Amino acid sequence: MEEEFVYWRHKTPVGIKVEEVCGGCRYTGRVWEEMARQIYCENGREAYREIGHFADGAPFIYGEENRISISHCAGLFVVATLPPTPEVELGEYSRRACLGIDAERADREQVLKLRERFLSDAELAMIPADDVKANITAWTVKEAAYKAAMKPGIDLRTQIRIDKMPELNALGHATLIRMHDENAEAANTPDEEPLELYSYESEGCMVTIAFSPKSAKFGKQK
């Protein structure tokens, strides 16, 4: 019997809901992603959930006021969700709804050849050059923080700084470094925004969530 898709909720201690879809090994590539997305939309709610995207590519659920973030890699589709934030315009960055998630296969050794493209000199010194999982985790940190920033074009190497690498199931810290624009002063936007990081391993993948200390949170996860 061929493996079917499995939908389940991954408990996190940081007050962020994470839903995962795995399995479905009869499918590959784009077909697998579309099927996994369909499984997500059919589960977790009494009614079907429909995913849309803002102009910058950030996802949302039609009819809901929750910030979500999505990632997928071979064999795993993940969606992180914050509580509803009706006071926030979800199409724009807000500390109350600052969230990003990223997943990558833990054995993808190609990352070792690319680390100088996304890690600063200080980060290169911090993260062992031969540690595949650590470099994969660093990559997911950068990508999750990029999604949380909601500003296309941010440079992973220079505008997202890893201050403390997250150990598995423990918090780490990063800083989002913003570039000035014509609205920055009017919006009272600081040059740097702190981010918290939470990483875990699931289905042979490293997964990292990036969020603001001021993001809305759920209570104890059940």
Image: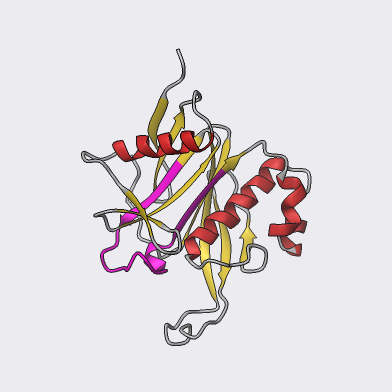
> Percent x, y for residue 114?
73, 51
Q: For the point 38% across and 33% down, which residue is it? A: 8
Magenta-colored span: 78-103
Q: For the point 58% across and 42% down, which residue is it? A: 104
Is 194 one of the magenta-colored residues?
A: no
Vertical comparison of 153 with 66: above or below? below
> Percent x, y for residue 82?
35, 54
Q: For the point 60% across and 47% down, which residue is it? A: 167
Q: For the point 21% across and 41% down, which residue is it? A: 47
> Percent x, y for residue 19?
39, 40
Is 84 one of the magenta-colored residues?
A: yes
Q: Is residue 10 visible?
A: no
Q: Quadrant of residue 204?
A: top right
Q: Residue furthest top?
A: 1
Q: 115 or 130: nearer the eye? A: 115
Q: Quadrant of the C terminus?
A: top left
Q: Residue furthest front?
A: 31
Side of 219 where 195 appears, left or right? right
Side of 86 where 196 appears, left or right? right
Q: Quadrant of residue 79?
A: top left
Q: 198 or 156: nearer the eye? A: 156
Q: Quadrant of the N terminus?
A: top left
